[in-house]
Amino acid sequence: KHSQNAIRTKNKINNSINQSIYQPTMSDSAATTETLDFIYVCQTEAEKQCASTCVGVDACNLCHCAVVENDASGPWGDFMDVFLGLLPIIILLIVTIKKNPWPTTQSLPFAAAAMFLVRTMYFGSDPLLSAGCVIKGLHEAWTPLSIMAGAIFLFETMESTYCMPYMMREMKALTNEHPVAEGMILFSFATMVEGASGFGTPAALGTPMLVSMGHPALESVVMLLVFNTFATVWGAVGTPIWFGFDMLGLSEDDFLEISQKSGIAMSVAAILMLPWVLTILIPWRVVRHNLLFVMLATIGTVGPLLGLSFISYEFPALLGGVIGCVLTGLLSRFRVGLVQLSEEDEALWMERRASATEMMVAKKDAAELESSDDRYSSDSSKTSIHDDHASAEIEERHDDEDSEERDAELADVALNEQPQPEKPTASVPDQTEEEAEIEAHLGPRKSLSPRYAMEIILRVLPIWGVVVLLILTRVETFGIKEHLIDTEPNFEIVLGSWGIFRLSRTLVFQLNHILSYPNLNWTYQFLYVPFFMPFIF
């Protein structure tokens, strides 16, 4: 009896082991990973149940589930796995930094094609999954492209409506042309703009502002690019986090933890590095004399940024930049920590500004002179061709006439010829006319009064309007976010093996089960992605 009971117990254990290997349950993925070299990926719960209970290849094929291998390594060892995985990026770097670099329209698709070949030829990835991921990637590109398009549309509108010239004029008046105050206000402004639109727009927007104040162009670009790095993590209301890491399957808590750690690192880095970053544009002696102002302005921006990074991964840069602009403006207005430039420092600074202005004017003169040369050579060639044709026609027409009449006609033609244009000389562009036109449109600067406050509110409406709309559409307390990201389809269209297209009532575009591969989906939230709302709107 005891022997028979022991045999029955052993058989039960063996049956349980066999079931865990051949009939895995989708709910216990950890056990499946330990006992199997693959997992099932299914579209519906019924298909998952079918895959967990089927016996035999034919029966399991009827479940319409994809089989994904857990072991994705290649046949040549770990070193070659890493090397070939990095090979497309290495190729991209080589063709980008070589003497005659490829344009990105060629280098990026070439690197993507190389990655596709590595995945399918070396790692042995499912070709259907690899092709489906290419299609999904083409659709995913709409998210960053639309954000950049919206930001460009907004800033071009601000330029054409004289919003940007107004902000430049007010910034000059607020800082009294103190270089350190100008640099720190641009730091807060760059943080705010990066938080709103991302993708390096602070450098494209802030550089013209610095150049208009007399700063050298190259140094202005470099300083703005470094300023931009402190807020890149939260660019375009957290796009690098919620979009960049979305494919990893992270939770909201994971996103918030990324924001917290990034906030600590970037805040410490900003406090330590900003004085040295300012020396790209401003002499160290001037920065050192105003170090208290630099520290207060830095803390006024990164302090709120750090605090907000613990409660949100979308707003730290945006709201931190807004608060920083206000606090830095107040510090500049009341000259807190700002030291008036000494005669020696002012002479050094004015010399640097003058050299930058001369260089900018020289470049404009060279461009205009080159354009004039092109027009001159074109007009001269046209005139010469015209002369040749006129002379030939007269000779043919009057070949039988006497020489006196022919000479007279040639003289008449010479009198009727248009004079050749003289080669123009370069002239210094009249900058005062452009400034006079802007001032005529903006009108005289108003003194502190309710009318002045109303003018500021209306003139900078695109900036604070974007901030308000982003807050309203992303803070769940207002109840708008849940509607903008609602994926419940209003209708759907089956596009054959390409996938299932769905559109919700709040314009959430979806392409599900791309190339019939289970759960390979694309989603684009038209009213939630920072494109139409808030930039176009």
Image (spheres, rainbow, N blue to C red):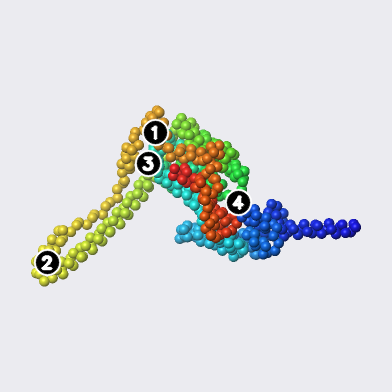
Q: Which mark is residue 260?
A: none
> Which numbered disc flags the more N-terminal residue, 1 or 2?
2
Circle 2 is placed at which residue position?
406
> Which numbered disc flags the more N-terminal residue, 2 or 4?
4
**Camera-nearest label, 1 or 2:** 1
Quadrant of the frame with the N terminus:
bottom right
Q: Secondary structure at mark 3?
A: loop
Q: The residue under label 1 is which amino acid type?
A: Glu
Q: Quadrant of residue 43?
A: bottom right
Circle 3 is placed at which residue position?
161
Q: Is residue 444 left or right of residue 107?
A: left
Q: The residue under label 3 is which amino acid type?
A: Thr
Circle 4 is placed at which residue position?
248
Q: Residue furthest bottom?
A: 400
Q: Measure the C-alpha gap from mark 2 to mark 4.
A: 88 Å
Q: Measure the C-alpha gap from mark 1 to mark 4.
A: 47 Å
Marks 2/4 in contact by CB < 8 Å: the verdict is no
> Which numbered disc flags the more N-terminal residue, 1 or 3?
3
Q: Residue at x 51, y 46 (%)?
A: 505
Q: Quadrant of residue 452?
A: top left
Whether residue 90 appears in this view of the structure is no
Q: The residue under label 4 is which amino acid type?
A: Leu
Circle 1 is placed at which residue position?
455
